[in-house]
Amino acid sequence: MKTDEQIQAREERTALVSKLVGNYSSADAIDKQPGMRDSLANIAAGHIDSLSYSMANWGGSGELADSKGLFNYDEKHLRDLGESGTANFLRALSSDKESYDTVSVAQQTYGSSLMAAQGNHHDNALDAGLHSVSMHGLLDQARSESIGEEFAEQAKERNKELEKQGEWRNFAVGATAGLVVGVASELIIPAGAAAAIAVPLAFEVAGGAAETYMATQTIDWLDENEYKNDQQAIEGIQKARQDGQYNAMTPLLNYAAQHDMSPTEVRALVSRARGTYHDGGEYTDTDDVRGW
């Protein structure tokens, strides 16, 4: 940026981004305004440098680690958006696949360019690449949790339908009290479930006893037919993580190939990257607070 006007415009934009980061810290806040998500994702992509810089101050280490120098803070006129606010903002964006994709691609591109900007400073280039890996870990963990939540919501909806069928069974048996259980069950068992429930045809029970009996059968039926998509959720999360890890490592592996790093050096780099990736995920891991 060469002119005062350009610098001022940049500072005004980053000031706006700072307000957006503070105001849109959850998926609910974003989705309350239709169309806002795409705009925020594009804004985040356009300011991925400031967002990335804001996550480079773990435990207050940024000054001694010269994060400003690594990110060329002054010349690029970056803004510190705050570690916590940035993590929440990126978590909220990652709850949706399209906005996640927008930010993830921007981070991969920025990670590569930040590495290239270090010139012949090999250690700095690797540090820049590893920080980018950490950012991918942050984004990917948030996306994985969102996928898990989506599958959990689907399971809840399917099981609500099963519960409705169970309630109908109880209602119907109350209306037909006095009939033999065998006859009643033929009338009220949900379609397709008759083969799954064996009701002794010779067992005659009337009134409250019939309701109790059929309620017990209903519970058994619900237990047997409970909709579970745990495996689908696991596979979806695993696929997202594998894709995310590949995207995270691409800048580093490209750098390693271009600089003829030895297999031993690459293995050491991958080991560091793996740890950094998981460290980044800690920023958006909500295992201790989520309720699904």
Image (cartoon, rainbow, N blue to C red):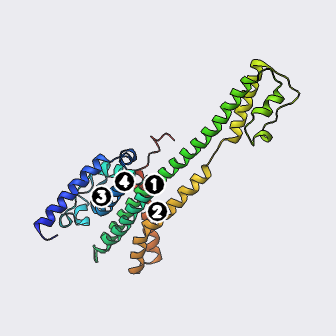
Tell which circle, 3 or 2, labels the residue nearer the N-terminal end: 3
2 and 4 marks in contact (CB < 8 Å): no
Tell which circle, 4 or 1, labels the residue nearer the N-terminal end: 4
Decide if residue 91 is on the left or right side of residue 43: right
Tell which circle, 1 or 2, labels the residue nearer the N-terminal end: 1
* Alpha-carbon span between mark 1 and mark 2: 10 Å
* Alpha-carbon span between mark 2 and mark 4: 25 Å
* Alpha-carbon span between mark 3 and mark 1: 17 Å
Mark 4 Cα-neighbour bin, 10 Å: few <14, some 14–19, many ≥20: few
Tell which circle, 3 or 1, labels the residue nearer the N-terminal end: 3
Q: Is mark 3 on a helix, strand or loop?
A: helix
* Residue type for callout 4: Gly
Residue 9 disc label: none
Residue 51 disc label: 3
Mark 1 Cα-neighbour bin, 10 Å: few <14, some 14–19, many ≥20: many
Which residue carries the number 1 mark?
143
Q: Is residue 126 visible?
A: no
Residue in the image at 37% along x and 59% along y? 135
Q: Is mark 2 on a helix, strand or loop?
A: helix
Which residue carries the number 2 mark?
244
* Alpha-carbon span between mark 4 and mark 1: 20 Å
Q: What element carries label 1?
A: helix
Tell which circle, 4 or 3, labels the residue nearer the N-terminal end: 4
* Alpha-carbon span between mark 3 and mark 2: 18 Å
* Residue type for callout 3: Leu
Q: In which quarter of the image is residue 226?
A: top right
Residue 35 disc label: 4
Judging depth in this view, the residue of 51 and 69 nearest the camera is: 51
3 and 1 marks in contact (CB < 8 Å): no
Quarter in which the N terminus is drawn: bottom left
Residue in the image at 47% along x and 50% along y? 146
